[in-house]
Image (cartoon, rainbow, N blue to C red):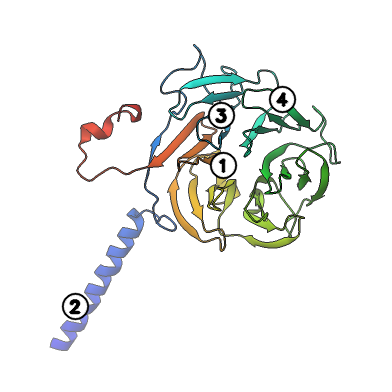
Amino acid sequence: MLSRMRRKLRVSIAALALAALAAADEKGWYPHEGGLMKYRVNIRFGEEPDTMPEGWKFGRVSAVAVNPAATEVFVFQRGKKADPIVVFDPKGNYLRSWGKGEFGNPHGMRVDRDNNVWVTDNGDHQVMKYTPKGERLLTLGIKGKAATDDKTFNRPTDIAFAPSGDFYVSDGYGNSRVVKFSRDGKYLLTWGKKGSGPGDFNTPHSIAVDSKGTVYVSDRENNRIQIFDPNGKFLRQWTHLGATQNLFITPKDEMWIITHRDNIENITYDTLAGRIMRIELATGKILGAMESPGHWLCVSPTGEIFIGSLTGNVFRWYPGWLSRGLGAEEGLRPANQR
């Protein structure tokens, strides 16, 4: 009798344990891959403080970039109530702007090591290079012409710079290829076609190059990042990072991405519900993650993470975390007053 009661007791305890696990499962949050990265955020960088010309506000923010000295932040946005390119100091104070009437649809933006500002226009099928003050230095592609030869693009998405000064363009929404140019803009080579095999692309949405010249391409609709040598030879791929919107590699070869679980989530949520991740460049291992909407990511030389979001925001993430003892009143104060 006693042994039967003990068996029943063990069964009851096991059942309760399973029920508790199931309940925890229902309530629980999915863990942050690689551990939670502890940052705080200013969700209205460039609009708080309100220093832009009267009546100006962001539309959809497609991209953001920081110069090598971390003294200027460049925002590329699609709204009609401000110029397409707006420049701020690191605290979000307006400095200058340009580009009204120059772009069909703003998409990508990078600042090279010489302080030149590069953008991709996927509406007019062009790539442009500017001085930091807005003087145009170079135009690639023919305005309004979508094609696939050495002088045209079809909705290009991003630019990346090799250690040699050569650069790459991911091309993009209409085409499914990467195009390589010399530092002075001379066409060198291209690779890729529509598909899902090695070296094929379905929306090459972002591109980055490490210090050794290895090329990383976000093959977004194929839910992978493909990795190539400088001449387009396929080396390997990562398929565990979802539908990556944007890649960023620091001068110290630290990789950061903004990504979504898969391409369906990305399109359905319109870039909401994304995650920022830090990636080990040698292996693809996730070193840390945190939630953020976003279409574009740039890490400043001072370690801040700037996100361009199609919600109409620039998010400025900076290292920090709320202490356990922080009062409710302090926690509710606006970010620009903390």
Say if residue 124 shows up in the picture: no
- Mark 3–mark 1 Cα distance, whole angstroms, equals 25 Å
- Separation of marks 4 and 2 at Cα, in angstroms: 79 Å
What is the C-alpha distance between the residues marked 3 and 2? 64 Å
Looking at the image, residue 29 sits to the left or right of residue 12; the answer is: right
Indicate left or right for 97 with 19 as reference: right
Q: Secondary structure at mark 3?
A: strand
**Residue 167 or 323: which is nearer the viewer?**
167
Q: Residues within 10 Å of mark 4 (few under 14, many from 20)?
A: some
Q: Which mark is residue 136?
A: 4
> Circle 2 is placed at which residue position?
9
Q: Is residue 302 above or below residue 11?
A: above
Kindly identify which residue carries mark 3. 75
Q: Earlier in the sequence, mark 4 or mark 2?
A: 2
Left or right: residue 251 compared with residue 104: left
Residue found at x 56% / y 17%: 81
Using a 10 Å C-alpha cutoff, classify the residue at mark 2 as few (fewer than 14 neighbours), some (14 to 19) or many (20 or more).
Answer: few
Tell which tag, 4 or 2, sits nearer the viewer: 4
Q: Secondary structure at mark 4?
A: strand
**Residue name at image x 43 percent, y 58 percent:** 34
Q: Earlier in the sequence, mark 4 or mark 3?
A: 3
> Which corner quadrant holds the N terminus?
bottom left
Residue type indicated by callout 1:
Thr
- Residue 43 sits in which quadrant? top left
Q: Which quadrant of the structure image shows residue 122?
A: top right
